[in-house]
């Protein structure tokens, strides 16, 4: 343990003396926060939708079909209770939920203006805006097609509701995912370049002639970067809270424990890049190779629902895909570990897999 602490202390002091690394750690989170705090608007179709149809009449089924035929809403499931509808939205299985109350057709023909509720997941402002606008247009078109407007007052009391982000504030959607994006960029980059630089300077070989073991050397060198990752995550979340008023609805322990898991994945990528690269430039190029797919395919900026299915399938191989869902679920929806297990399990498998491969290659490289 003392040898690990000594290596960790040495690495920490080396980071403090490295101006380039310090500039990246200090300036990039702030720059990216300001840049991505303002969103990119996209038109999106095929929003996953759950249907809670308590009326089950021919008219209500035609109304549901109107939503499906618009190509903006894809019915992924029909539920039988409000709890199931809420769970589907909580866990990200659906972006919208359409609730047709009992007696909908009877009240409509009796002139009692029945309620029709479209519940929209507001954590992502772009699909939410699309759902609201197209939902209202679909209902109005359906009313006219069915000949239900003898007067100017709408016969259906259509009440869409936005959950999690009622005002559709773009920073609520963009900023939480920025934690994962910066960790994906910074942690592998500084880890890989630091280890490769040590190899170029011959410092690792000098350490190996001491009583320290290769495993102790590796652990000691990685510990400071774990701390840096947590510091980056903490600084972005605090800045987002005060600059953009992003609410933190989930448990802080859940937030930082899942962030720590993602940091291990990022460290694994950095360590793997250091075993492949022969110099610092190669290490940076290898790390940056994974950045564009992570930004474009993870759902951080562009909704994955609008992607062609081969690209959509490829996005499941990107760790940021899962972490974006995790951190948005915790920050905006207040979800716990039990609600996030479908994202946590793949991330755990990635962490174990990439760290195992990286450690073996690191030991082989040292040998």
Image: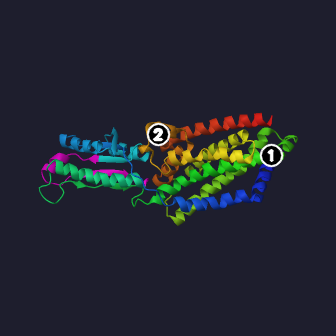
Q: Residue at x 47, y 36 (%)?
A: 310
Pick the front one: 276 or 268:
276
Q: Secondary structure at mark 1?
A: helix
Q: Quadrant of the C terminus?
A: top right
Q: Quadrant of the N terminus?
A: top right
What residue is disc 1 on?
200
Which residue is painted at 67% across and 54% down in the image?
A: 228
Q: Position of residue 250 (x, y in %)?
A: 50, 53
| In the displayed structure image, the side of residue 113 where residue 20 appears, left or right | right
Horizontal and vertical percent position of residue 57:
19, 40
Compare residues 49 and 1 and report the one nearer the observer.
49
Residue 312: numbered disc:
2
Give the magenta range.
99-124
What's the CA distance linking mark 1 and mark 2?
A: 40 Å
From this viewpoint, is residue 55 visible? no
* Contact? badges 1 and 2 (CB < 8 Å): no
């Amino acid at each position: 343990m003392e040898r690990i602490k000594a290596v960790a202390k040495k690495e920490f002091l080396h980071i403090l003396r490295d101006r380039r690394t310090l500039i990246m750690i200090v300036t990039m989170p702030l720059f990216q926060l300001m840049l991505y705090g303002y969103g990119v608007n996209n038109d999106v179709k095929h929003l996953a939708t759950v249907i809670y149809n308590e009326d089950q009449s021919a008219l209500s089924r035609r109304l549901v079909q109107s939503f499906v035929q618009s190509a903006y809403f894809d019915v992924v499931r029909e539920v039988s209770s409000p709890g199931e509808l809420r769970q589907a939205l909580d866990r990200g299985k659906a972006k919208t939920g359409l609730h047709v109350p009992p007696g909908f057709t009877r009240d409509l023909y009796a002139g009692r203006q029945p309620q029709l509720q479209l519940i929209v997941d507001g954590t992502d402002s772009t699909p939410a805006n699309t759902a609201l606008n197209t939902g209202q247009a679909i209902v109005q078109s359906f009313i006219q097609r069915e000949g239900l407007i003898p007067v100017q007052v709408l016969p259906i009391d259509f009440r869409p509701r936005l959950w999690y982000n009622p005002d559709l504030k773009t920073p609520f959607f963009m900023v939480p995912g920025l934690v994962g994006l910066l960790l994906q960029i910074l942690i592998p980059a500084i880890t890989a370049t630091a280890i490769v630089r040590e190899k170029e300077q011959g410092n690792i070989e000098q350490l190996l002639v001491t009583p320290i073991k290769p495993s102790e050397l590796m652990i000691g060198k990685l510990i400071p970067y774990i701390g840096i990752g947590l510091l980056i995550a903490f600084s972005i979340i605090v800045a987002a809270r005060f600059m953009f008023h992003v609410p933190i609805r989930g448990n802080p322990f859940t937030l930082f424990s899942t962030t720590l898991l993602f940091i291990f994945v990022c460290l694994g990528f950095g360590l793997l890049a250091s075993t492949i690269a022969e110099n610092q430039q190669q290490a940076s190029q290898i790390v940056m190779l994974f950045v564009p797919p992570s930004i474009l395919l993870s759902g951080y900026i562009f909704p994955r629902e609008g992607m062609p299915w081969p690209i959509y399938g490829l996005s499941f191989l990107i760790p940021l895909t899962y972490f974006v869902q995790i951190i948005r679920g915790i920050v905006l929806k207040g979800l716990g570990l039990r609600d996030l297990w479908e994202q946590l399990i793949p991330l755990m498998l990635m962490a174990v897999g990439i760290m195992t491969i990286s450690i073996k290659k690191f030991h082989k490289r040292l040998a």
